[in-house]
Amino acid sequence: MGRSKTIIPLLWLSLVDAQINTPNLSWHAPRKTWINDLSEVINGTGTHGFIFNSSQLPPGTPYSAYNWCNMPHVRRQEYPKAMQGYTLEYVEVIHRHHKRTPYASNTFPKEGYVWDCSDEGLFYYGQPLNPSGNNSATAFWSVYTSNTNPFAPAGFNGTCQFPQITRGGLDDSFQHGKDLYGVYHDLLGFLPDDIGDKITYRVTNNVITSQVAGMLINGMYSPSETILLHIQPSSIDSLEPAYSCPAASSVYSSYGVGSTAANWTAHLTAAKPLFSSLDAISGVPVDSVDWHKSFDHYYDNLSARQCHAKLLPCNINDTSKCVTQDQADTVYRLGQYEYSFIYRDSPASLQAAVGSYGVFLAELASNIRSRISGQSPVIYRHNVAHDGSVSRLLSILQVEVMVWVGMGAEVVFEVYSKNRKRYMRILWGGQVLRSSSPVLGAVDMLDLDVFLAYVDGLVGEKAGKVVEFCAS
Ligand SMILES: *[C@@H]1O[C@H](CO)[C@@H](O)[C@H](O)[C@H]1NC(C)=O
Ligand SMILES: *[C@@H]1O[C@H](CO)[C@@H](O)[C@H](O)[C@H]1NC(C)=O
Ligand SMILES: *[C@@H]1O[C@H](CO)[C@@H](O)[C@H](O)[C@H]1NC(C)=O
Ligand SMILES: *[C@@H]1O[C@H](CO)[C@@H](O)[C@H](O)[C@H]1NC(C)=O
Ligand SMILES: *[C@@H]1O[C@H](CO)[C@@H](O)[C@H](O)[C@H]1NC(C)=O
Ligand SMILES: *[C@@H]1O[C@H](CO)[C@@H](O)[C@H](O)[C@H]1NC(C)=O
Ligand SMILES: *[C@@H]1O[C@H](CO)[C@@H](O)[C@H](O)[C@H]1NC(C)=O
Ligand SMILES: *[C@@H]1O[C@H](CO)[C@@H](O)[C@H](O)[C@H]1NC(C)=O
């Protein structure tokens, strides 16, 4: 008895040591579900409980359900409290912005109706920061088109910039902030009562993330003073990501969007009849490469409408020909399939994500290190980002089941300490993230050194391996 008690901890320690010294950095296949099963995606029906038509869940639906319009995040009702004895030391949150209008590139050549955003203002101005400077007026944008400007915009008429966060998306952002505060301040007493120097917020160069941040911060702190949003120069932004990594782009295009690889084109070929029906209704030219190299545009077009309780589109010449819910559901299944293929199913996805998002991971590791070494006062970092950010992050973490990350989709990194050791817990959609990598597994009080060894091993110190790969 006495022996096994000592042998097991020793064996355990040596396993942990091995994972720290030589972590397995290989790609591991995601779990098989309907999402990465082409016949289920093409020949199946419905959306397997995934929701696309409201920020609110239908009654009786568990909060953890996939809701494209408003993905689940950390909130008090479902928060899995850490076991006793673990002390929370550092939190870093990253999530996609909340729901928005479509991008102009995803609107049909001619839209049958207007999209109105006059129920909100996009505040944009510069103001001197030296205390004695004159103040700016709190000025906001109001979008209009004039009868004299002969160039009608492609897509919708109306009073929105495509894209912008919609009124509903602003409300969801506010609630997201309230929910996080409800856990990290009210429930855990981890966050201080004021933002001070312990909390920072970061946005990308795409203005929609700032639109979210303002509402979200007010949902958390309702601060009376002005709040600083960290942002990197647009050419090197690691959060968006926007830094240049030609090697990663060429890996992605070798197997994913734009490639002629048979296993990528298989779903596009199988979906030809669907493309034809959608083109006939929308007026999208059948030879438009952008609209047919993936389902991205149709997915964004249809889901943005449905999230805002707008009807599915009809042909502008014959309003009896409309996109059906079955067709929309098929587009939504295909979108999930594409994200899983691009970010997880392809064995090359890990290297492509490390190249294009490794800098953010290096920054995360550095943030953690500077906190636990006492060099930085920041205990909570909050990043508002995009689907391209969160997808690549999940790709690097090798999430077990990949989805197209919807509006507000969130990953939270929590660093704990116990008995002078530190641990990592990762929450995805508010629950413990499960990784296909044997190094990470269910990331629930993983030895922090193992997590850092995994990140360092992939991206290198100061993202050195990213630099090397990107230039290759
Ligand atoms: C990583 O783990 C997989 C199985 O999970 C194994 O096939 C592979 O050889 C391992 N790679 C290394 C470098 O140990
Ligand atoms: C879908 O069903 C049809 C008819 O049964 C079949 O020919 C086709 O191969 C199936 N598609 C996929 C991708 O499995
Ligand atoms: C949204 O879609 C679900 C099926 O996914 C349906 O049950 C529900 O009635 C729809 N809700 C609205 C508001 O249209
Ligand atoms: C989607 O495409 C249809 C057809 O052209 C267009 O009428 C609609 O405005 C687009 N909607 C969105 C949200 O992009
Ligand atoms: C916008 O509205 C004008 C006037 O109603 C119309 O002529 C034009 O076709 C519309 N543009 C689009 C892109 O629908
Ligand atoms: C404010 O503007 C006025 C008018 O230009 C100028 O005289 C004054 O110096 C400015 N005040 C400060 C503090 O910059
Ligand atoms: C509507 O009819 C016009 C004129 O025939 C045509 O040019 C246009 O392509 C049609 N649009 C759609 C979406 O069918
Ligand atoms: C696609 O095909 C390539 C080349 O045969 C293969 O290496 C890769 O694993 C396949 N990808 C997926 C996701 O099946």
Image (cartoon, rainbow, N blue to C red):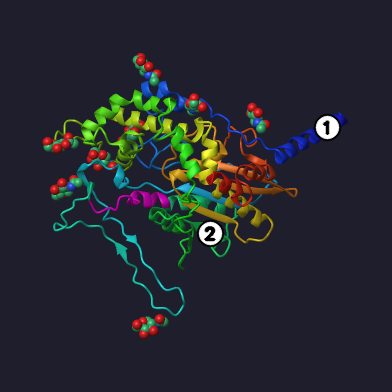
**Rendering quadrant holding ligand 7:** top left
Residue type beneath disc 1? Ile
The part of the chain drawn in magenta is 158-173
Question: In which quarter of the view is residue 260 placed?
Answer: top left
Q: Relative to 302, say whether 220 is above or below.
A: below
Looking at the image, residue 307 sits to the left or right of residue 470; the answer is: left
- SS at mark 1 in the image: helix
Which residue occupies the foreground of this view, 79 or 343? 343
Residue at position x 66%, y 61% in the image: 375
The reply to whether the C-beta atoms of the residues labelled 2 and 1 are less than 8 Å apart is no
Q: Residues within 10 Å of mark 2 (few under 14, many from 20)?
A: some
Determine which residue is flagged by label 2.
Answer: 200
> From mark 2 to mark 1, how far is it between C-alphas?
45 Å
The amino acid on which the numbered mark 2 sits, given as a three-letter code, is Thr
- Of the image marks 2 and 1, the number of the one nearer the N terminus: 1
**Residue under the image location 18 percent in, 35 percent down:** 315
Circle number at residue 303: none
Q: For residue 155, what is the image quadrant?
A: top left
Q: In the displayed structure, would residue 269 be above or below residue 460? A: above
Residue sitting at x 63%, y 61% = 376
Residue extending farthest right: 2
Task: Work out whether 229 lies above or below 169.
Answer: below
Which numbered disc covers residue 7? 1
Mark 1 packing: few (<14 Cα in 10 Å), some, or many (20+)? few
Residue 293 image offset from top left, x and y in percent: 35, 34
Kind of element beneath mark 2: strand
Question: Could you tell me residue 100's position as x and y percent?
Answer: 35, 47
Would residue 395 appear left or right of 447 to someone viewing this image?
left
Is residue 88 or residue 369 the one in the foreground? 369
The N terminus: image quadrant: top right
Q: Position of residue 67 (x, y in %)?
A: 41, 38
